[in-house]
Amino acid sequence: MEMKGGIIKGEHFTAAHAGPWEGMMDYVFSPLPQFTFPGKLFLNEAMGLNGMEVSLGVLKPGSGTPYTHAHGENEELYLFVKGTGQFYVDGQVIDVSEGSSVRVAPQGERAWRNNSTEDLYYIVVQAKAGSLEKKTSEDGKIVTPHFQWPE
């Protein structure tokens, strides 16, 4: 699905605007014909991502993921940005809310739901487990001259 706010591309970047969180239900992910997942937007194609997968999502009150799943190679990091709900992983149920994060290894069996009366907003980052060779402090480098913000 096309991003609502458009895409800006440069030699070393892509910027996109999906629109406000409240409009996220306009996006629908359907991995198989029998599964429809409204409120889920994958950023990979629009952003040109090739080392990670990122999605934005919202679950309406009383709804949840339409299936439990695991991965073959990719770990996932779930970042909950607003609302409350529950996250299921490997037989354990964890309460989540704004500021919660859950990392799941590829083999972890996972699902999540919104058991509250308000929308649950989240971001999922997915990457191949064990592929991070350098952390920010090792891989990042300061460039000069330093950029100066216009006044």
Image (tube, rainbow, N blue to C red):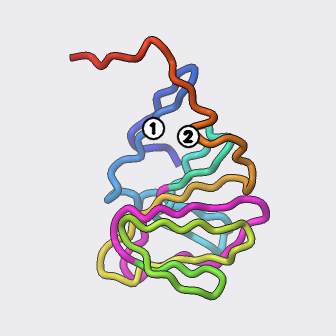
| Residue that extends furthest to the top in the rendered view of this protein | 145
State which quarter of the image contains the C terminus: top left
* Residue 111 highlighted magenta (yes or no): no
The residue that mark 1 highlights is: 16
Q: Position of residue 74 (x, y in %)?
A: 71, 59
Nearer-the-camera pick, 6 or 44: 44
Q: Position of residue 140 (x, y in %)?
A: 57, 31
Q: Is residue 82 above or below residue 14?
A: below
**Disc 1 marks which amino acid?**
Ala
Q: Are marks 1 and 2 in contact (CB under 8 Å)?
A: yes
**Callout 1: 10 Å neighbours few (<14), some, many (20+)?**
some
Which numbered disc covers residue 46?
Answer: 2
Q: Which residues are magenta?
A: 56-84
In the structure shown, which secondary structural element does the residue marked by tag 2 occupy? helix
**Residue 80, located in which quarter of the rendered image?**
bottom left
Q: Is residue 109 above or below residue 57?
A: below
| Residue that extends furthest to the front in the rendered view of this protein | 137
Q: Position of residue 150 (x, y in %)?
A: 26, 16
**Callout 2: 10 Å neighbours few (<14), some, many (20+)?**
some
In the structure shown, which secondary structural element does the residue marked by tag 1 occupy? strand
**Residue 45, located in which quarter of the rendered image?**
top right
Task: Identify the residue at horizontal 67%, vertical 40% (top origin).
Answer: 134
**Disc 2 marks which amino acid?**
Ala
Q: Is residue 2 above or below residue 104?
A: above
* Residue 74 highlighted magenta (yes or no): yes
Nearer-the-camera pick, 131 or 12: 131
Q: Position of residue 95 (x, y in %)?
A: 44, 81
